[in-house]
């Protein structure tokens, strides 16, 4: 299965039973508990509605016995008005609790969705490395929507059906215990049918969901890969693959809906059998009871007989929805309870600068420069001095990526990393950002351990241009301003000019006000990367990280932005990872990494003279991947 498999479109494998129903219900009730007053109103309305439904049926007894049989038409009219009032009251209460539950459920689900989003902002990158984007998206779509559906409909329906069923059984026992035993026997058969058909239906619906995920995933892959499909004339094979998955989905859906469709007819026929038996035996009792069981009693009992099966059927239909909702809520809460990104750093970033007064260097607050503010009030000017001291790091304990790495980048220096894929180049830049925590060693920034610096402050001081560009829905100016949200229009345009993006932006239909969507799909890869570089320029950071930033830009475009990039890097500490060795020739120091270790270091001329790994890569004797 490709990347668009079932896991990206909902719960893996379709329907899943919750692992811990009690704990998950407790967490859901904590959200619902914020609306205790409204829930109390809902319970009252449900009780009144059920009482009206059950009581309205009981009124058939006096209606027939006391008014129809004696021929009391004025009394009959009054009784009909009373019954109408009872049923209208029940309908009004049903409408009322339904509207209130919609308000409660949507507000509750909105709060859950907001809490989930807030928690995701606090999760470390390693969590997202371990979970696909589609899997996390399904928490917002499939899982939360099942919770919404259950709160909207199933909650009130189950409570209402339970009250109706209980009230109906009680009234049937009051009217005729003997006939009620017959109903119990039929109900037992109905429960067995529900269990048999419902179990098979659940299994086939699980298969249907799995097959649907396969179909959706395949379609997504084929849509994303249309260019590749057409280049290799793969249309016929693509259609065959779709037909096979579509047929599997059709078969699973047919079985699932066949059993689901059989539920209602089976229950309906059992209800008819129960009704017929009650009618025949009730008529015999009414004839031979000597007035203890009259025609009105039989009429009311038959009405209850018609009603008693409905709650059982409705509850059985709602159980899958409820269990799916609990399972969905459980998956949502698993994300919300994941360990957030830890940050014990207390050093903050403030506007400050240093000058010399009377031969003494002093640091003072200044709106045009930055400094680190320590907890004791000491100010350390932000220079961009980054050092690694015997750093050991692995994404897990069993796989070490960096082993005893030491390096330093003085303020204003350009440091380049080259090496094969997996050598640890990008990992080094990720550690500077504290996306991950090292196992041993130390990383310092201006002499301060990065673990002592607040992550927000640390990342605010860094500008990053990644190989994979990402543009947000909004104007070109908004995407550049993402680097610094308070940047003026003039500063945005200056950043674009610095990156060499101003010329092509002005040729867009609305210039800087052109709206981008679909991750900037209307722009070329090079243009998107230029906006990415302009975004970093807008942030105006003292330390700049270029992670293969020009790998997606053609040679001509690269030449056009070279001068702008030089201006952007001037006076800054710069870390560069590049596929093209030509882009790192002017680096102050070049680090050659292999298998997590720095095997060579020096400037371009030094490394060429050594005729080692860098020489092999530069002359094409070895592959740089």
Image: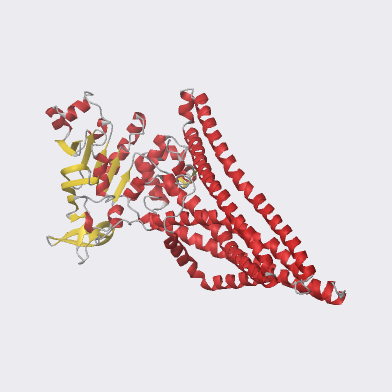
Residue 301 picture quarter: bottom right
Q: Could one spot residue 571 in this view of the protein? A: no
Q: Is residue 137 left or right of residue 283?
A: left
Q: Is residue 374 left or right of residue 320?
A: left
Q: Check the image and report above or below for 27 versus 201.
A: below
Q: Nearer the viewer, residue 21 or 9?
A: 21
Residue 523 picture quarter: top left
Q: Nearer the viewer, residue 35 or 383?
A: 35
Q: Is residue 603 left or right of residue 84?
A: left
For the image shown, how many numbered marks are present on the structure? 0
Q: Check the image and report above or below for 531 versus 182.
A: above
The quarter of the rendered structure image containing the C terminus is top left
Q: Could one spot residue 616 in this view of the protein? A: yes
Q: Is residue 356 left or right of residue 514?
A: left
Residue 31 spot, x, y in % from top left: 47, 65
Residue 537 spot, x, y in % from top left: 33, 46
Q: Nearer the viewer, residue 80 or 480?
A: 80
Residue 167 picture quarter: bottom right
Q: Check the image and report above or below for 92 versus 112.
A: below
Residue 572 spot, x, y in % from top left: 24, 46
The quarter of the rendered structure image containing the N terminus is top left
Residue 94 spot, x, y in % from top left: 65, 66
The colour scheme is secondary structure
In the image, what residue occupies the spot 49% across and 33% down? 222
């Amino acid at each position: 299965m490709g990347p668009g498999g079932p896991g990206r479109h909902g719960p893996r494998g379709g329907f899943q039973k919750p692992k811990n129903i009690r704990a998950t219900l407790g967490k859901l009730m904590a959200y619902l508990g914020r609306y205790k007053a409204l829930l109390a109103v809902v319970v009252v309305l449900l009780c009144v509605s059920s009482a009206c439904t059950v009581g309205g049926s009981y009124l058939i007894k006096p209606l027939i016995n006391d008014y129809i049989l004696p021929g009391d038409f004025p009394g009959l009219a009054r009784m009909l008005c009373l019954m109408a009032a009872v049923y209208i009251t029940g309908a009004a209460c049903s409408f009322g609790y339904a509207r209130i539950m919609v308000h409660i459920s949507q507000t509750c689900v909105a709060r859950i969705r907001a809490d989930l989003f807030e928690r995701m902002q606090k999760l470390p990158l390693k969590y997202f490395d371990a979970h696909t984007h589609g899997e996390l998206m399904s928490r917002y779509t499939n899982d939360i929507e099942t919770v919404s559906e259950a709160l909207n409909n199933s909650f009130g329906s189950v409570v209402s059906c339970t009250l109706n069923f209980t009230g109906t059984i009680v009234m049937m026992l009051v009217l005729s215990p003997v006939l009620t035993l017959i109903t119990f026997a039929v109900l037992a058969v109905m429960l067995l049918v529900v269990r048999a058909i419902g179990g098979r239906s659940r299994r086939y619906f699980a298969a249907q969901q799995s097959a649907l995920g396969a179909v959706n995933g395949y379609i997504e892959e084929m849509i994303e890969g249309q260019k590749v499909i057409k280049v290799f004339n793969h249309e016929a094979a693509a259609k065959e693959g779709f037909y096979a998955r579509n047929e599997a989905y059709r078969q699973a859906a047919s079985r699932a809906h066949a059993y689901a469709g059989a539920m209602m007819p089976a229950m309906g026929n059992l209800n008819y059998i129960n009704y017929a038996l009650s009618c025949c035996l009730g008529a015999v009792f009414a004839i031979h009871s000597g007035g203890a069981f009259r025609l009105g009693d039989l009429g009311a009992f038959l009405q209850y007989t018609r009603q008693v099966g409905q709650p059982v059927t409705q509850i059985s239909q709602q159980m899958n929805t409820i269990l799916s909702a609990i399972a969905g809520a459980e998956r949502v809460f698993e994300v919300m309870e994941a360990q957030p990104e830890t940050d014990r750093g207390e050093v903050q970033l403030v506007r400050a600068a240093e000058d010399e007064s009377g031969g003494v260097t002093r640091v003072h607050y200044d709106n045009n420069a930055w400094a680190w503010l320590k907890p004791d009030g000491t100010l350390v000017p932000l220079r961009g001095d980054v050092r690694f001291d015997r750093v050991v790091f692995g994404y897990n304990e069993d796989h070490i990526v960096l082993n005893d790495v030491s390096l330093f980048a003085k303020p204003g220096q350009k440091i380049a990393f080259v090496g094969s894929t997996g050598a640890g180049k990008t990992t080094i830049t990720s550690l500077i950002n504290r996306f991950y925590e090292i196992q041993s060693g130390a990383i310092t920034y201006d002499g301060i351990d990065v673990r002592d610096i607040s992550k927000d402050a640390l990342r605010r001081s860094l500008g990053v241009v990644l190989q994979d560009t990402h543009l947000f829905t909004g104007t070109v100016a908004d995407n550049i301003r993402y680097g610094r949200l308070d940047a003026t229009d003039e500063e945005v345009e200056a950043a674009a000019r610095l990156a060499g993006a101003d010329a092509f932006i002005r040729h867009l239909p609305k210039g800087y006000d052109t709206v981008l969507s679909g991750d900037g799909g209307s722009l070329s890869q090079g243009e998107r990367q230029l906006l990415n570089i302009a975004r970093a320029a807008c942030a105006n950071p003292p330390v700049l990280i270029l992670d293969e930033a020009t790998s997606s830009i053609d040679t001509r475009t690269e030449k056009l932005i070279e001068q702008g990039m030089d201006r952007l890097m001037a006076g800054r500490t710069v870390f560069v990872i590049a596929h093209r060795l030509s882009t790192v020739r002017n680096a102050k120091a070049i680090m050659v990494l292999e298998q997590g270790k720095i095997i060579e270091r020096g400037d371009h001329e030094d490394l060429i003279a050594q005729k080692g790994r860098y020489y092999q890569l530069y002359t094409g004797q070895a592959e740089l991947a």
